[in-house]
Image (cartoon, rainbow, N blue to C red):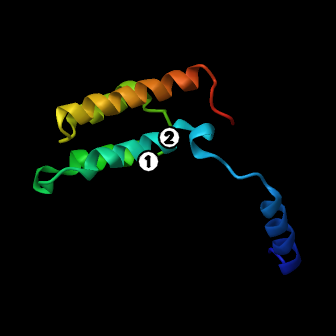
Amino acid sequence: MVTSEMREIIINDLKKEKEIIPDEHDGSYELMRETIRSYMNIKNTSVLNYKDLNLVYLMSVGTWKKGIYKRKETINESNLPKSEKKRLIGVMDRIWQNAIDEKYKI
């Protein structure tokens, strides 16, 4: 059980921690933000279905266990306009390369 004293110590320790800059920490934050941006301008939302929900979900999980190819496949299966699919795949390729080049702070 966590006592109030322990809770205070934890809170004070967290207050001293340096703020995480999401785009420097992990590409998943940028990828999720860009995925939502792709959906922002869809005027006719009646074309959206479970494939779009799958895309948003897959981009929101911070794991790459499914691999980049599965993510690209999910983008291509979505109901996004072709131009947005291409843009989002480009963002993903850049993020993937940044990860390979170890540009993110862990």
Res 23 → quadrant: top right
Mark drawn on residue 2: none
Residues tagged 1 and 2 counted as in contact (Cβ below 8 A): yes
Task: Assess disc 2: are there few (<14), some (14-19) or many (≥20) residues with their C-alpha within 10 Å of its C-alpha.
Answer: many
Q: In the image, residue 54 lies at what x, y percent?
A: 30, 46
Q: Is residue 22 above or below residue 66?
A: below
Name the residue carrying label 2. 28
User: Residue at horizontal 68%, vertical 35%?
Assistant: 105
User: Residue at horizontal 59%, vertical 45%?
Assistant: 22
User: Residue at horizontal 78%, vertical 61%?
Assistant: 14
- Taking the view exactly as shown, the residue that stands out farthest to the front is 41
Name the residue carrying label 1. 60
Q: In the image, residue 62 lies at what x, y percent?
A: 51, 43
User: Residue at horizontal 43%, vertical 28%?
Assistant: 67
* Quarter containing the N terminus: bottom right
Secondary structure found at label 1: helix
Res 59 → quadrant: top left
Task: Assess disc 1: are there few (<14), some (14-19) or many (≥20) residues with their C-alpha within 10 Å of its C-alpha.
Answer: some
Q: In the image, residue 10 lies at what x, y percent?
A: 82, 66
- Most foreground residue, 47 or 7: 47
